[in-house]
Image: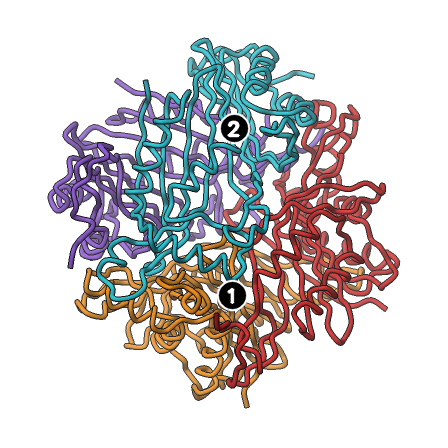
Chain colours: A orange, B cyan, C purple, D red
Amino acid sequence: MRDPVSESDVRGVDLAEVGIRGLDLPVMIREKAGTLARVLGRVEAAVALPHYERGTHMSRFVEILNRWSKKAIAGSEMATMLGELRETFHSPRALLRLEFKYFLAKQAPVSGLISQLDYDCSFQGDLSDEGYVFTLGADVPIMTVCPCSKEISDRGAHNQRAILRVRLHTLPDTVLWLEDLIPLLESQGSYGIFPVLKRPDEKAVTEAAYDNPKFVEDVVRDTILALRATPGITWYSVRCDSHESIHNHMAYAYGEGGIG
Amino acid sequence: MRDPVSESDVRGVDLAEVGIRGLDLPVMIREKAGTLARVLGRVEAAVALPHYERGTHMSRFVEILNRWSKKAIAGSEMATMLGELRETFHSPRALLRLEFKYFLAKQAPVSGLISQLDYDCSFQGDLSDEGYVFTLGADVPIMTVCPCSKEISDRGAHNQRAILRVRLHTLPDTVLWLEDLIPLLESQGSYGIFPVLKRPDEKAVTEAAYDNPKFVEDVVRDTILALRATPGITWYSVRCDSHESIHNHMAYAYGEGGIG
Amino acid sequence: MRDPVSESDVRGVDLAEVGIRGLDLPVMIREKAGTLARVLGRVEAAVALPHYERGTHMSRFVEILNRWSKKAIAGSEMATMLGELRETFHSPRALLRLEFKYFLAKQAPVSGLISQLDYDCSFQGDLSDEGYVFTLGADVPIMTVCPCSKEISDRGAHNQRAILRVRLHTLPDTVLWLEDLIPLLESQGSYGIFPVLKRPDEKAVTEAAYDNPKFVEDVVRDTILALRATPGITWYSVRCDSHESIHNHMAYAYGEGGIG
Amino acid sequence: MRDPVSESDVRGVDLAEVGIRGLDLPVMIREKAGTLARVLGRVEAAVALPHYERGTHMSRFVEILNRWSKKAIAGSEMATMLGELRETFHSPRALLRLEFKYFLAKQAPVSGLISQLDYDCSFQGDLSDEGYVFTLGADVPIMTVCPCSKEISDRGAHNQRAILRVRLHTLPDTVLWLEDLIPLLESQGSYGIFPVLKRPDEKAVTEAAYDNPKFVEDVVRDTILALRATPGITWYSVRCDSHESIHNHMAYAYGEGGIG
C-alpha cells in the first residue's frame, strides 16, 4: 500500500502544529499529598511538521496518549511525554495541552462542613530546541461585590459570580501545586464560593463579601501582586470575567507580565 | 439514477420526525409595531415519516426555508409554512422550531437612557391531523436577591443574574407579542437587567432589588400567577435558573400547567 | 434568625421541581464487571414543592449528593437516594439527573489495538407516589455513509460522524448495562468509530462502511428494531443527528414508543 | 456621591485591558456591493488602564457601542470607533472584538440553485501609540476526503466536515472583502459545502471531492500559498479542524507567518 502521509512535499511550507484536538481521555494527575487524582481530560497533542514532509501519522498520538493515561501526569511527566512525541515523530517540536476539572475540598466558614468544589484547570507543555515551557492554568470561581454600587446605595450592593483565570510559568525546579495556587486565587475576590453553606455560613459569607467590595480591576491587580510575591513564578496572565448581576454581559480586566 | 430515498420500506416503523437541525438562516419576525425585525434564526424542520416510505428528500426543507426567509414570520405564518411542508412531503405532520435573539429597547430607571437588550426567544409550530399547536418561548435575564441572605445578614445580601424561561400556548385567535410578554416576565425578578446604567440608575436598581428579595420559587410562582391573569394563554411552563453568586451551581424552580 | 425558606405560602401554586442544576461532582458508576468507574458527573436534583410551603433548603441537596458521591451508583442506588431526598424534604416527589462521560475499550478491527472511547451517558430517576421511573441514556458516535450519494456517484460517497441518542426504560428487575447497550447501538451505523486505527484498520473501516450505507431514517429504524428485540425494555426514544459532510447543518430522524 | 471608579491607585500595576465582554448587539457590516448587512454581533470592548487609575466607567462602552450599532462597520470605521474610545477613556490603547455570522449566496454546482450559507466571521481592531492593527477572521466549513483512506481502500474513502479558520492582517490601504476571502478559502478543501443540493448536485460534489483528497496538512499549506498570492496581506494564521468521521476527535494543522 502506498502511504500518502509519508510522501515528501514540495510546497515549501513549514507547519507549526499538526496533531489531534478534542480527545477525551481519563488521566491521572499527581496531587500535592502524593496521591493520584483520576480526572476527565480533554487533550490536544501536536508536533511541528517540516516543509519537506507531507503528513503526520495521527494514530500515533492516540497510541502514546493511551499508554500515558495509565501513569501520573504533572509538569515533569509532560516533558517526558513530549520527548517521546518528538522522537516518535522525528520532529523539532512537540506540544501537549490538557484541560480537566479538578476538585478540592472546601470548608464552610462557620459550620465547618466540607464539600468538593470543581475548578477548570490546564497543563500545557511545549518542547522544542529552544527548551521546555510548561504553562499551568486555573479558572477559579469567586464572588465580587461592586464597590460603586455599595458606595452609592443606601442599602445592598450588587454582586455576582466571577471567574478568575490565571496562566503562569515557573522556574524549571519549582513545583507550584494546584492545591496551593487555587486557595491563593480564591482569596482575591470579595469572597470565595462554596458548594454547601448552612445559614450561619451564608450570613458570614454575605457580610464578609459586603465588607470587601472589589472591581474586576482590583481583583486582577491584587492577584498580580500575590503572584509576584510567590517564589518561582516567572510569567503570568490574569483575567477576571464578572457575570454582572445588573447586566446581560461581563465586565472584565486583564493583565500579564514577566517576573524577575 | 435509482433514488434510494423514494424506496418503500418493510421494517414497519413509523418515525415521528425526520428533517434537518442546526440550520442558521436570517429570518424576519413580525413586530408589534407592524414593522419587521431581521434576526438570526437557528431552525429545525421535520415531517413525520410513515412506515412504508424509506426516506425523506431533505433538500426540500432548505429550499422551502430559504423561500420563507424573505417573508415575515409570526404564529399564523408558521401555520402556512407547515401546511406547505405537509403538502410537499405528503406527510401527516410537520414541525418547525425557530430560535433567535430578539432585541427590545430598555430604558434606565433614572437617567432614561435607552439601549438594546437581547432575549433568547423561540417559535415552535406543530401541524398534524389533530390541529395546529404554536409554542412561544422567551428566556429573560433578571436579577434575584436572596431573601434568606438578606434576612440573616447584618448588611448586604447575595444576588445574581437568573434566567426566567417561559414556554406557552395561546388560544388560536390570540396574538401574544414578545413586546408585551418580555416586560411582564422582567417584572417578576427582584429587578430587571439593563445594558446601560449610569450611577444614579445603579443606585436605584441596587436599592429596588434589595427591597424586593425573591427565591427562585417566588419568581416562578409570581410568573405563573401573572400568566394566569393574562387573557388567551392556555398552557405554560416556567423555569427560573439562578446562577448563585455564592455557589458554582444553579438553584432552580419549575412549574407547568394548563389554564381554563 | 427568621427563616424565610420555612415560611408558609398563600399563592396556591404547586411547583413540580425545586432544586439545583449544573453541579459538577465526581461519582462512581457500577460497572458490569462488578468494578467501579470513577466519572465526572453533572448533577441535577430536585423535589416537588407543595403549594403551602414557600421554599426548599437547597444546601441539603449538595450535602446528600456529597455523601452519595463516595458510593457506587446504578439504577437501584438511585432509587435509594431518591427515597432519602423525599424523606429529608418531606416531599411527594424527588428527581435526580446525572450526566457523565463513560469510557469503554474499543478494539480496532484488524490490528486488534485497544483504546478507550468516550460516550455521553445519563441516569435519571423519578420517584413519586406513582412509583419509580429510571431512564437510561447513551449518546453513541457512529459513522453514516449516504446511500443516495453512493448510488448516484461513479466513485466515493459522502459520509460523516453522527450521534445516535437513545433514552429508555426497563422493567423493574432488568439491569441493562452500558457495556451491553453501547455496542448494540454502535452496530446500527454504517460502521463504528475508533480512537486508534492503523492503516489496515482504516482500510477495513472505510470499505465496511461503504458496503453498508444508511440514512438517518435507517439508523433509527434499525435501532428501534434492535431495542424491541432486547428483553426488559419497556419504552425508548431514539434520535440520530448526522453532521452531514456536504452541508453546514444536521440531518436527523426521531422515533419513540412503548414495548409490550 | 463618592465615585470609587475615579479614585487613584497606588498598587502600581498597569492593566492591558479593562472593559466588557459577551455583549450581544445588532450591528451593520459594510458589504462589497456597497450595501449593508444587518448581523447579530457579539462584542468585546476594552481600554488599557494606567497604574495610577483605580477603575473604568464601564457604562460608557455600551453607550458608545449602542450609538455605533446604527452605523456601518468595516475596518476603517473600527479605527474611528477606537479613536473615540481612546479619547473618552483618556487611555493609551483601545480594543474592539466583533464576532458575527455572515451569510453569502452559494450556488449548487449543477442545478444552479442559490441558497444562503453562514460563516463565523470576526473583526478585531487594536489602536495604540504604536498604530492601528486590524485583524479579519473567517471560519469556513469545507469537506475533506482522506487521501490515505482513498489510497488503501478498494472502494470509498472517509470524509467529513472541517472548519478552515483564518485570521489575517492587511496593508493599511487594502480592503479585503469577506465576499472575496470566503470563496478563496472554500476552494482549499476537497470541496465546498452547500445548504441545498439536488441529486445531480450531490453526485457532482461527491465525485469532485473524491477526486481531490486532502489531509488537513494539505488544506493549511494550500491556503497559506493562496494567501501569500493575494496582494495586501501582511500576516496570516491558518488552522484546519477536521471532525474525522472515523474518530470521536479532530485532526488539525496550524501555520502562521508574515508576508513581505
Q: Amino acid at mark 2?
A: Trp
Figure disc tally: 2
Report the chain holding disc 2. B
The one nearer the camera, D194 or D17, is: D17
Residue bearing mark 1: A97
Measured from the top left, where is residue A235 in percent x and y?
54, 81
Mark 2–mark 1 Cα distance, whole angstroms, equals 48 Å
Report the chain holding disc 1. A
Image: A85 above or below C81: below
The one nearer the camera, D95 or C124, is: D95
Residue bearing mark 2: B177
Q: Amino acid at mark 1?
A: Arg
Residue sitting at x 37%, y 64%: A154
Name the side, left or right, on which D196 lies relative to B109.
right
Residue sitting at x 22%, y 61%: B152
Name the side, left or right, on which C151 lies relative to C196.
right
The one nearer the camera, A159 or B67, is: A159
Residue A33 visible? The answer is yes
Measured from the top left, where is residue A237 in percent x and y?
54, 74
Residue D222 visible? The answer is no
- Quadrant placement of the C terminus of chain A: bottom right
Local secondary structure at mark 2: loop
Local secondary structure at mark 1: strand
Measured from the top left, where is residue B176 in percent x and y?
49, 25
Image: D213 above or below B85: below
Other residues around mark 2 within 10 Å, as few (<14) / some (14–19) / many (≥20):
some
Name the side, left or right, on which D69 lies relative to B99.
right
The quarter holding residue A107 reads: bottom left
